[in-house]
Image (cartoon, rainbow, N blue to C red):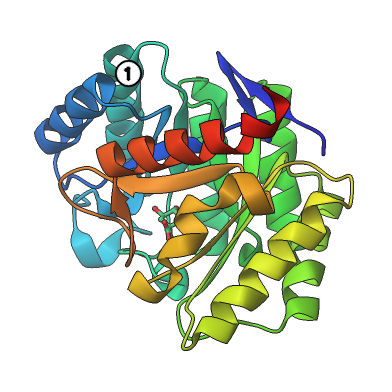
Amino acid sequence: MKTLEIRNLTLGAGRPKICAPIVGKTKAEILEEAKAIYKLPADMAEWRVDFLQPITEDRLDQQLESYLDQVLNILAALRACLQDKPLLFTFRTTAEGGENALSPENYTRLNQAAAASTFADLLDVEVSVGKTWATQIIQEAHSHGTAVVGSSHHFQRTPPKGEMISLLRNMQALGVDISKIAVMPSSIQDVLTLLETTAEMQTNGGGPIITMAMSSLGGISRLAGEYFGSAVTFGSVSNSSAPGQIPVEDLNTILNIIHSNLHLDKK
Ligand SMILES: O=C1C[C@@](O)(C(=O)O)C[C@@H](O)[C@@H]1O
């Protein structure tokens, strides 16, 4: 599998990297969470921008300019706070399980502004925004040296394996650097389908992928990335950003045990 270098991290090789989401509603809360993450064994942080209390909650699209100023101001402060830890910028839309919504045009403008600031190392781009918009974001991100995580979230179900593979491959064809899929399992068979998809993608030669089955039923998928081929696992700090996330410190312990166990045969 191709790997991706982000600052001091190699994504797609060795132990999965731990990403801690920041879900504060205000600048003060956001920076407090970033300070806590800086001290934890998290390899990187994700700012879930959709959790930020917008200037006028229901009229985000109309207030875009001031919203962009607010976001970029916080992004600069986050960059300083996290120092060398890579930062993923994510606006998760309500349609994909997030806390806020933007028109496709404004979603594109927000992500392009974040890329142009160069404060974030990676941008999460929901491919459901459409090929034209996604391509514009990816091009802008790459022109500033910002990597892109293509994403697709299924909070109601686990799609069949063929559908998940097509989704992940289509993201790769769009030119993203990492492709991610999150699904909701309703049985252990769904979790196995997700793991099987991950293992199959690992051998297809594309870039790194990130997969998870949400809720406690899917817990194993957040731990077993080194076996099946998921490059990053999201772990909670005080509040989680999705069902089933495991606290960062527990994740670190378990991932380390799995990693050393996997290398026992080589000793
Ligand atoms: O896409 C993901 C994965 C996630 O939904 C999870 O299930 O851990 C958590 C989100 O914050 C992140 O953007």
Q: Which corner quadrant of the figure contains ligand 1?
A: bottom left
Residue 230 seen: no
Q: Residue at x 32, y 26 (%)?
A: 41
Circle 1 residues within 10 Å: few <14, some 14–19, many ≥20: some
Q: Residue at x 46, y 62 (%)?
A: 220
* Residue situated in front as seen by the camera: 212 or 47: 212
In the figure, is residue 207 to the left or right of 159? right
Residue 217 seen: yes
In this rendering, the answer to whether 156 lies above or below 181 is below
Q: Quadrant of residue 159?
A: bottom right
Label 1 sits on residue = 82
* Residue situated in front as seen by the camera: 254 or 261: 261
Q: Amino acid at mark 1?
A: Leu
In the figure, is residue 226 to the left or right of 59? right
The residue at label 1 has a CB less than 8 Å from ligand 1: no
For the C terminus, the quadrant is top right
Q: Quadrant of residue 80?
A: top left
Q: Residue at x 45, y 21 (%)?
A: 119
For the N terminus, the quadrant is top right
Q: Quadrant of residue 262?
A: top right
Q: Position of residue 195 (x, y in %)?
A: 64, 66
Secondary structure at numbered mark 1 = helix
Q: Position of residue 26 (x, y in %)?
A: 14, 41
In the figure, is residue 220 to the left or right of 36? right
Q: Position of residue 104 (x, y in %)?
A: 56, 62
Q: Position of residue 191 (x, y in %)?
A: 55, 75
In the figure, is residue 97 to the left or right of 33? right
